[in-house]
Each structure stands twice: as structure tokens, then as C-alpha cells.
Amino acid sequence: MIEFQQILCPIDFSDYSRHALAHAATLARWYDSTITVLYVHPIVPMAASAPGAPAFPPLMATARDRDQVLESMRCFARGASESDVPMTFEVVEGTAAPVILGRAQELPADLIVLGTHGRSGFERLVLGSVTEKVLRKASCPVLSVPPRVDGAAHWPPLFTRILCAIDFSDCSINALSYAMSIAQEADARLTVLHVMEVPLEVEEFLSGDSEVLRDYTAGAREARRERLRTVVPDAVRAYCTVETMLAEGKPSREILRVAREQQSDLIVIGIHGRGAADLLFFGSATQHVVREATCPVLTLRR
């Protein structure tokens, strides 16, 4: 059984990170784990006033500054979680994403919980530098928590309707193992979704013969249904309700549609390893799901 014993939750004192900390506290209470609440204090550079002027060292936080921030963090946490959850508080100076990733490795963290900010316009296209870098580089699972929906409970309940999207790759099967473990722990309903997307080159190659294209898609559809039937062990079905589903179309759109229709309170998805060409966009399906989902998204790398 998978457990989250050490949870890292970076905060920036926004309502978004308050909501994320509430989710971290719910998980910590369930798994009897500890939360490390992290605030990354930026190092403020002192620019020279004129060309040729001497360079000054950057402004660093004083011991008094750190004590004040720590006290603010404790007050912030009291408003975001119940008092029975063990928490430690840390202030680290530096740049947010590298500090978060480094601290996650040092602990080591079993889970990073991050609040995602509501965005519009161009900022919706690139998810946001800190969240994007943590999602792309973290070696442990990352739970991205969107802004709180109006009318939602102040204390988020444990997940009861979980959607896990798989493409049968190693990383998605790894994600499924986490989804099954959480579902068994919470006695939740688990939907395992596979989205079948006919490759564009196949469509173009077979576009002149609709009967061959129909046969191809029918065969692929049946083969994937069979894989879905066997991907969840019977032992898991004995402890939680499991549904398998095959959809066709654009993966991110179908994942979000099913999550919306089923009122999922958690989406679980695996992230493929990416090369230099994907440093900016770490995976279109994952990026769209994290950006658009109204429920938390658990992303995992293999």
C-alpha cells in the first residue's frame, strides 16, 4: 500500500496556497504523516545606480525577518488546517522552483502539494513558471490544487470519486497504482479512463478507404477494451468500486469532460519523460488537464 509519510507544501500566503495546505492537511491526517510548510524568501538584488558604479551584495533576510515570517506561517497554517496535523515550518532564501525541488529531495518528500493560481490570457498558455518547473522536474508525485470553488467546504474531504487516465505506458501504470491505493484507502469510486486517439498519419493514410479505417478503429477499440478489463486486479475491486471507460478524441478534452460529468474530486495522470524540445511545454495533455481542472490533479513521473 502506498503512503504519503512526508508531505512538502510550499506557500506564498495567497488564498491559493491556503487551499492547497488544507488539502495537504486532509491527506496528512488520513496517512498520519508530517507536513513541511515551506516559504521561499526571494533574494532581492541591489542594482547599481549607474554604469561603472560598484556592485552591492543582494539584500538578505535578517534573523528578525525570518522569525517574523515563521510566525506569519504558523498563523497562516492555523487558518488553513486543524491543529492535530503535525507541521514543521521552514524559510529558505532563493528562487522558488529550485528551492522546492531541492528541499523535496532532501527530506525526502513523498508528495508535493502546490496551489495553482487562476490565470487568463497568455498566462493560461504557459502554466506558470514555478508550477511548471516543479511538475516537470519533481521526482516525487505532485498534487496541483486549483482555486477553491465557491460554496465548497472549507475543510476538503478525502477523495471519494477518483479519475485515473492511462495510456498503458509504464508511467501511466505507475500512476494507476497510486490511484488504486488511494481509492482502497478511502473506499472511493475509481474510474480508469483510456482515451483512444487515431494518429493523424493513420487517418491520412486510410482516408481514401473508409471501410479499412472503420476496421482499424474497431480492432483497436476492442483491443484496448480488453486491456482495460485486465489492468485492475480483482483484489482492488474487492475494496473499492472500479469502472473502466474507453473514450475517443483529444485526450485532455476527454479527461476533463469525464471528470466534469462524474464530479471527480481527484484526477491522477502520469507524466512521460521529456527531452530538450519539451522544456517549455512539458506535455500538452497533462498541461491542459492541470490548467483547466476544477479538482486537484495528482501527477507522477516514472
Image (tube, helix red, strand yellow):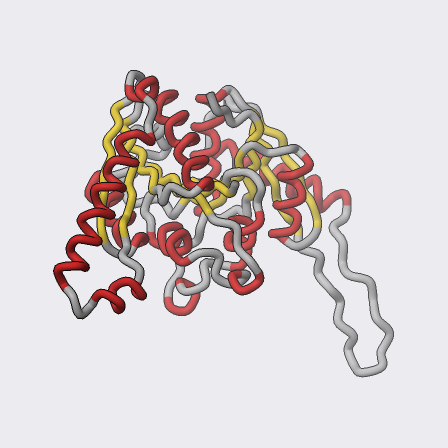
Q: Residue 242 appears in which quarter of the rendering?
A: top left
* Front position in the image: 50 or 198: 198
* Front position in the image: 140 or 90: 140
Q: Residue at x 45, y 43 (%)?
A: 299
Quick check: 20 left or right of 240?
Answer: right
* Front position in the image: 154 or 37: 37
Tell me residue 133's x, y (percent): 55, 54
Q: Residue 175 appears in which quarter of the rendering?
A: top left
Residue with the most extreme left position: 211
Tell me residue 76's x, y (percent): 52, 38
* Front position in the image: 166 or 203: 203
Residue 19 seen in the figure = no
Q: Residue at x 57, y 36 (%)?
A: 8
Does residue 111 lie above or below 33 as drawn?
below
Q: Residue at x 51, y 43 (%)?
A: 301
* Count of residue discs: 0
Quick check: 298 left or right of 230?
Answer: right
Residue 229 seen in the figure = yes
Tell me residue 192's x, y (percent): 29, 36
